[in-house]
Image: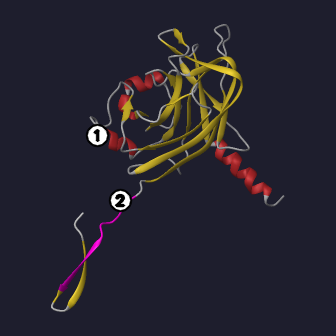
């Protein structure tokens, strides 16, 4: 029991630091939802598409404000590992411009971060676009695989709320990744980043198994050269 208790406390702490958001058409905002899990970092079930209920059903952000993975992330790399637990042949749909979009315009998710710690808000992101960023690479289509590993560097291409590129807005992007307050993933579809995903057929649970941030691997140091001068053997660094 002494060994089991710390493990359970770890799981509770890790899961409590992650929050999912389901979009409410009644309020126009994402409603926070618990992601508690005893066996993983976080898990959340997709909700069934239903226009005739007031219950928010579009799963959008899954994020954390944990200080161990936020703050100054310049020169860092994200490693994410997760899987889906599906019952039946799940079909994922997403919404854009009041139109439901089933495959082949696949629902997906991508990495997301913000300089704001509050639950993601579409209206706020439209007014403060360069504080919200999504990864342009490493997009996972939910209908293609139920197990995935994603590795994305912060020096790769990222896109802001209105399509601004991290390479074009480099100074502002560097400021943003040095003050990350919230990070995780966002579910959406097609070329849209923040619209949320629902299931139409079958049930599905998204399980986050790993979310690590570590410094980028350093390039190998150049070999040393040996110089001989006046019978003295010297080691000098090769120029980079």
Q: Quadrant of residue 90?
A: top right
Q: Magenta segment: does it hold 8?
A: no
Which numbered mark, 1 or 2, is in the foreground of this view?
A: 2
Q: Position of residue 52 (x, y in %)?
A: 67, 7
**Circle 2 Cα neighbour tier, 10 Å, few/some/many (<14 / 14–19 / ≥20):** few
Q: Is residue 175 above or below residue 233?
A: above
Q: Magenta segment: does it hold 222?
A: yes
In screen coordinates, is 223 left or right of 45?
left
The magenta segment is 218-228
Q: Pointer 1: what residue?
A: 170
> Residue at left 48%, top 36%?
111
Q: Secondary structure at mark 2?
A: loop
The quadrant of the picture occupied by the N terminus is bottom right
> Residue at left 50%, top 39%?
183
- Extreme residue toward the right, this view: 1
Q: Is residue 208 above or below residue 240?
A: above
- Extreme residue toward the bottom, this view: 231
Q: Mark yes or no: residue 71 visible.
A: no
Q: CA distance from mark 1 to mark 2?
A: 23 Å
The numbered disc on residue 219 is: 2
């Amino acid at each position: 029991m002494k060994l089991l208790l710390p493990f359970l406390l770890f799981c509770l702490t890790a899961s409590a630091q992650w929050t999912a958001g389901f979009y409410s058409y009644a309020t126009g905002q994402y409603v926070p939802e618990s992601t508690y899990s005893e066996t993983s970092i976080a898990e959340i079930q997709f909700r069934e598409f239903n226009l005739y209920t007031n219950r928010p059903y579009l799963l959008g952000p899954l994020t954390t404000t944990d200080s161990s993975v936020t703050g100054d992330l310049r020169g860092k790399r994200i490693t994410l590992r997760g899987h889906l637990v599906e019952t039946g042949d799940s079909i994922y749909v997403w919404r854009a411009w009041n139109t439901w979009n089933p495959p082949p315009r696949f629902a997906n998710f991508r990495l997301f971060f913000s300089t704001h710690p509050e639950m993601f808000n579409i209206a706020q992101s439209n007014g403060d676009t360069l504080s919200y960023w999504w990864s342009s690479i490493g997009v996972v289509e939910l209908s293609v695989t139920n197990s995935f590993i994603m590795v994305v560097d912060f020096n790769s291409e990222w896109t802001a709320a209105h399509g601004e590129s991290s390479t074009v807005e480099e100074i502002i992007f560097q400021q943003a990744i040095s003050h990350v307050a919230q990070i995780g993933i966002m579910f959406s579809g097609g070329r849209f980043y923040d619209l949320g995903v629902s299931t139409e057929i079958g049930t599905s649970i998204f399980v986050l198994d790993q979310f690590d941030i570590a410094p980028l691997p350093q390039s190998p140091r150049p070999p040393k050269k040996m110089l001989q001068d006046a019978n003295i053997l010297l080691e000098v660094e090769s120029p980079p």
